[in-house]
Amino acid sequence: MDNNIFPNQSIKPIDTKINQKGNIEISGCDLVELAKEFKTPLYVMDKKTLLKMALDYKEAFSSYPKTKMLFASKALMTGAIAQILNSVGFGFDVVSMGEIYTLLNAKINLKNTSFNGNNKSIEELEFALDNDIDHISVDNFYELKILNEIAKNKNKVQKIHLRITPGIECHTHEYIQTGQLDSKFGFDLSMIDSAIELILNEYKNLNLVGLHAHIGSQIFETKVYEDAAKIVLEEIKRIKDKFNTELSEINLGGGLGITYTKEDNPPSVFEIAKIIINSINSNCERLNLEKPMLYIEPGRSLVCSAGVSLYTIGSIKEIENIRKYIAVDGGMADNPRPSMYSAKYSAEIANGKKENKPEVVTVAGKFCESGDILIKDIELNQPNSGDILCVYDTGAYCYSMSSNYNRVLKPAMVLIDDGKAKLIIKRQTLEQLVQNDVI
Ligand code: LLP
C-alpha cells in the first residue's frame, strides 16, 4: 500500500492486487469468493479506503481548526457507512426525511447535521426540528416562511444558513452543476438582502448564522473553490456593513472529483483544502472579518473509490466487424450513472485467466432498454459467460440512485476489512418487492 496515493486520485481501492489464484483481491478478500458467497450483482465497500479518505479530509483541513466535516449522505446512505463516518467525527448533510430516519435508526443524533434541499416538505421540516437537527440550509422564500411558522409552533428558534448560488460555472455535466445563476437551488445574490430583511424583521423564530454554497459535483478545477470562498466572504462583509450582523459560518459544499478512468485527473483533497483555507484567510484579512466556522460536505470523493460492483457475465452477442456485447446480471437499475450522465467506468475480469489476451467489448446491462450500457468499448481479458466482472468506483451515487426497474431486486452490499466481509445491506427479496402492492 502506498500512503501517498489519495483514494480520489486512483481508480482502485487502496489494497487491490492479484492473488495467487490470479483473482483480484481487495483488502485480503478474493472478489471471486465474495461473488460466490454473496451472489451477484454485489456492491462491495472497502473500509480501509473509506477511512483513508475520511482521515485525509480531516488532516487536509486540520490547519483550519474551525472546520466541520459533513458527509453528503445522498452519495451513499446506509446505517453502517453512516456509523463508520460518524465514528471518525463526520456529521451529515441530509436532504430528506428518509436520510434523517436512516441516521436515527443507526443511533446517530442530528447535532452535526445540516438539512438541505430546494423543496423540503412541512412534514420533513417538522421531523427535523422534532429530532433537534443542528441547522437547516434554507433554500428559498417559501421555505423561510413555513420554517418560521413551524419553529414558532414548536416554541423554537431554529438555526439556519441561507443556501446561495454564487454565480460560478464549473465544467462538469450540466445536470450536476449547481452554483450557476440559472439553477433551481438557492437564493441568487440579488435575493439575499430581501431574505435577510424578512429574517431580521419578521421571522423571529429563525436565527441566521451562515451562508451555504455548493458549486457542483465531479469538479477537477481548483479555482472555483477559491472563487466560491471569496464570493461568500464578500457577501458576509456586505451583510455586516448593511445589516450590522456578522454571520459566523460558511459552508462551501462538496464536489471534489474522483478518478473513474485514467483520463480523469482530479486534484487531491490536500490541494483543495489549501486553496480553500488560503482563500478564507486572505479574504478575511482583506475584508476585516472574523474567521468563520467552515463546513465542507463531500459526498462522492469520500465514498466512491472505496466501492466496486461485482457482476456475473451471462450472454454474449458478437456482431461481426461492429461490436461484441457482453451482458451482465445488473445494469442501469443498480448503476444508472452511465445512462443518465454518460458516465464512464473502469472494469476488469476478477477471475484469473491463464494468459492475457485483451479484447475490446461493450458491457451491457440486463434491463429492457437499448440505453442500458454500463461501459462502451472497454478492453477486457477474454470475457466469457460465467466470469466475474469488477466495475471500479461505484461507491457513490449507485446504490443511492438504484431502482427496481423491471422489478429486478436491489443487490446486497458487503463491507470488507482485513480479509473479512460483512453484509451491510441485504439483497432485496421477492416478498419485499411486492410488499406494498395492494391487490
Ligand atoms: N452538498 C450539496 C448541497 C450537494 O447538492 C451535493 C451534491 C453535495 C454536497 C455533494 O457533492 P459531491 O461531493 O458528491 O460531488 N447524482 C450525481 C451527483 C449529484 C450531486 C448532487 N449534489 C452523480 O451521480 O454524479
Image (spheres, rainbow, N blue to C red):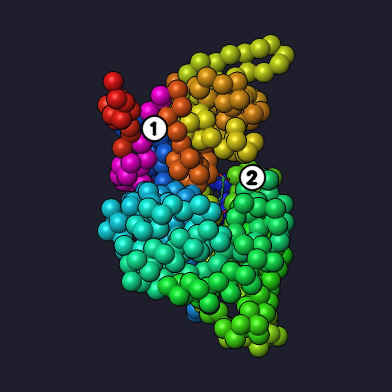
**Residue 216 appears in which quarter of the rendering?**
bottom right
Residue 121 highlighted magenta (yes or no) = no
Q: SS at mark 2?
A: helix
**Residue 3 x, y percent position in the rendering:** 51, 61
- Residue, disc 2: 175
Could you tell me the amino acid type at mark 2? Answer: Tyr
Which is closer to the viewer, label 2 or label 1? 2
Q: Position of residue 333 (x, y in %)?
A: 48, 31
In the picture, the disc for residue 410 is: 1
Front-most of residues 13 and 109:
109
Please tell me which residue lies in front, 127 or 151: 151
The part of the image, by quadrant, that contains residue 126 is bottom left
Picture residue at 34% right of the left edge, 51% below the top: 102
Where are the magenta residues, as a range?
407-425
Residue in the foreground of this view, choosing between 206 and 40? 206
- Residue lying at 56% horizontally and 60% vertically, measured from the top left: 140
- Which x, y percent locates residue 439? 28, 20
